[in-house]
Amino acid sequence: MIKDLLQSSPGLGNFAIFFILGVILLFVVLGFVSYAILAERKVMGFMQLRHGPNQVGGRWGLLQTIADVLKLLLKEDIIPKMADKPLFILAPVIAFAPSFMVLATIPFTSRFQFADIGVGLLYYIAISGMTVFGVLLGGWASNNKYSLLGGARATAQMISYEIPLVMSALGVILLSGSLNLNDIIQSQTHGWNILRQPIAFVIFLIASTAELSRTPFDLPESESELVAGYHTEYTGFRWAFYMLAEYVYLFAMSALITVLFFGGWMAPFGFLSFIPGSVWFALKFCFVVFIYIWFRVTFPRMRADKLMEFAWKVLLPVSLANIFLTALIKSLFF
């Protein structure tokens, strides 16, 4: 349906349809954020032999996250007296906006995608890199030493891990011969990239975890050292924007990994093709989200110096070796 609209001439009707679909996607993502938080709490509770939320909304705590969001909306919005007020207000928006923009290029099914552009993967990487400005500005504008340290850590971490992230994706690009996400999915007809590029998958998963600032790479907001890091001074709705950006990126990165390494909407075996592609995409997507939650429960937080060493001394050389190995295999056997 979306691709048919793309081929039609632009106009107010076209704009209205895309606007409505964008709003619908926003509500879908907000629903995911609400219940991804609940799922994370539940999975963590199960793995740590406790119940997790089980009061608000029945025995499963289905309304707990909604109650938390309502509480945030009703809390007082405090701006520190010595903060840079314009930047303090703008920073959460700068952090959140790119997280929603990158969803435009994700192909959820063969017919549902907002922007089928030739360099979809490049678009995702370029736009997602803009979030670091919102994080750094939030830390600096707060006029708080803990916030500034958190913002500096986040900037160094995101820039450092962006390099092995892109390098690992180059192996996938070499095999598919395209930056278009639909072409990357089609190139996996005879085998998913997780089987053809296992080293790239491991590097991409680790680097993406660092990009999301999730455990064990949650140094920018390590509570034991920096109170809450770059958003220490934020309260209420503005703080919620930072949390929203984090979980929207969890949605986007899980969808991107599904596309790059798990064949997107395609069935694992031909005889299962009767099941809709949206179902396959959702199942693979949920599996990747579960891996991120599993990481949070399992691994301890890394030291800041070890974090940077791991990016530059381990992931970067291994990702370069993977590119060389992929190019060699492709030239010899394809």
Image: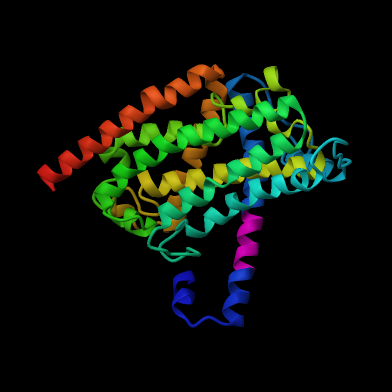
Residue 269 horizontal/vertical position (percent) = 29, 49
Residue 69 vs 189, above or below: the answer is above
- In the figure, is residue 118 to the left or right of 83? left
Q: Nearer the viewer, residue 122 or 259?
A: 122
Left or right: 29 as drawn, with respect to 194? right
Q: Nearer the viewer, residue 172 or 78?
A: 78
Q: Quadrant of residue 187?
A: bottom left
Q: On screen, 193 above or below 309?
A: below
The part of the image, by quadrant, that contains residue 172 is top left
User: Residue 178: x, y in percent?
Assistant: 30, 56
Q: Residue at x 50, y 36 (%)?
A: 159
Q: Is residue 290 left or right of residue 273?
A: right
**Is the image coloured rainbow, by chain, by secondary structure, or in one colour?**
rainbow
Question: Is residue 57 something that shows in the picture?
Answer: no
At 35% across and 52% down in the image, what residue appears? Answer: 267
Residue 305: x percent and y percent? 51, 17
| Residue at x-position 52% and y-position 28% | 294
| Residue 241 seen in the current view | yes
Count of marks, rendered view: 0
Most common secondary structure along the magenta stretch: helix
Q: In the rendered image of this protein, does residue 203 appear above or below residue 115?
A: above
Residue 61 position within the rendered picture, expressed as x and y whole percent measured from the top left = 73, 36
Query: Is residue 26 shown in magenta?
Result: yes
Q: In the displayed structure, does residue 299 sit left or right of residue 117?
A: right
Determine whether 177 is above or below 139 in the image.
below
In this view, the residue in front, 293 or 127, is 127
Magenta-colored span: 20-28
